[in-house]
Amino acid sequence: MTRLKTTIALVAAAMLAGAGAANAQAAKINDAQIAHIAYTAGVIDVEAGKLALKKSKTKAVREFAESMVRDHAAVNDKALALVKKLNVKPQDNDTSKALTKQAAAKKAELSKLSGAAFDKAYVANEVAYHKTVNGALEKTLIPSAQNAELKSLLETGLKIFQGHEQHAEHVAASLK
Amino acid sequence: MRAGIFAALCLAFAGTAQAETITITIGKATFMPAAVSARVGDVIVWDNKDIVAHTATARDKAWDVMIPAGKAARIEMKKAGDIEYYCRFHPNMVGKLQVAP
């Protein structure tokens, strides 16, 4: 549990560091980077959902994971279609890199767990992860987005992901 | 005479209280409008314009309607009362139906 908390704190710190840098130099985060961060965050949660579908036998957890795989894939498909239309090439950056690195560590950690321990750790991480990503969307990515269509997609995404955060909280409560 | 028949027909028509179809649009993970008045026998249609699936799930578990992305789903109101509902996948989406007898 301590390690889980540490990991969550690290991800949060990485996101905040990214967010802080973006706030200090608003012009430094462009739409190509924003698209990459949002897309990367989606891929990470699809992967986590797939892991949960492989490992969990709990109905509420599986339904939640199915919803994550379905929704984040749908939003990412839309994002890919949009960047293609806008002729923007998503650009790798420090925030995306930090997200990917933390996600790999979390995946390794979750992979070692099974049964109720896995369910609890997966759902707790989903709550924390959505909190962090939603915070970054709200405070940094959406305000920094220049293109109106990208901003609109991120806003819709935020509303959907806030729903995921609540859904995850409900599932977490049901596991206790 | 003709006027009398017409009036009678109008009354008969009004008396049957035609069931209505009421459409609630879903966009940006929001039920619009959030509150709707209906009568028993009316049909509620949820038209999902979003790219993700939603549900309209009654808090009292009376019904649970799946609304796939880009599709519409419907349900007939069978009893009167105020019904609060939400989306199971995105519980921050909430709506209310006020169904009169």
Image (tube, rainbow, N blue to C red):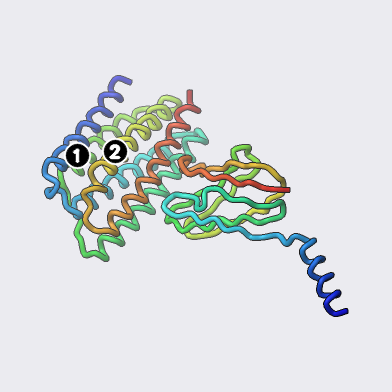
What amino acid is found at the position of numbered circle 1 in the picture?
Answer: Ala
Residue A30 locus on image (x, y percent): 17, 52
Query: Could you say which quadrant of the image residue A68 lies in?
Result: top left
The secondary element bearing badge 2 is classed as helix
Q: Chain of mark 2?
A: A
Determine if marks 2 and 1 fall on one subunit: yes
Foreground: B84 or A14?
Answer: B84
10 Å crowding of disc 1: few (<14), some (14-19), many (20+) = many
Which residue is at 50% across, 33% downward? A58
Image height of A119 relative to A70, above or below: above
Looking at the image, residue A60 sits to the left or right of residue B12; the answer is left
What amino acid is found at the position of numbered circle 2 in the picture?
Answer: Gly
Which label's residue is closer to the chain start, 2 or 1?
Answer: 1
Verify CB contact (< 8 Å) between mark 2 and mark 1: yes
Residue A21 locus on image (x, y percent): 13, 40
The secondary element bearing badge 1 is classed as helix
Which residue is at 37% across, 51% downward? A156
Looking at the image, residue B23 sits to the left or right of residue A124; the answer is right
Which quadrant does the N terminus of chain B fall into? bottom right
Foreground: B89 or A113?
Answer: B89
Foreground: B64 or A119?
Answer: B64
Query: Could you say which quadrant of the image residue B57 lies in?
Result: top right
Q: Which residue is mark 1?
A: A19
User: Which label belongs to residue A51?
Assistant: none
Q: Which residue is mark 2?
A: A135
- Between the C-alphas of marks 2 and 1, the distance is 9 Å
Looking at the image, residue A87 sits to the left or right of residue B55; the answer is left
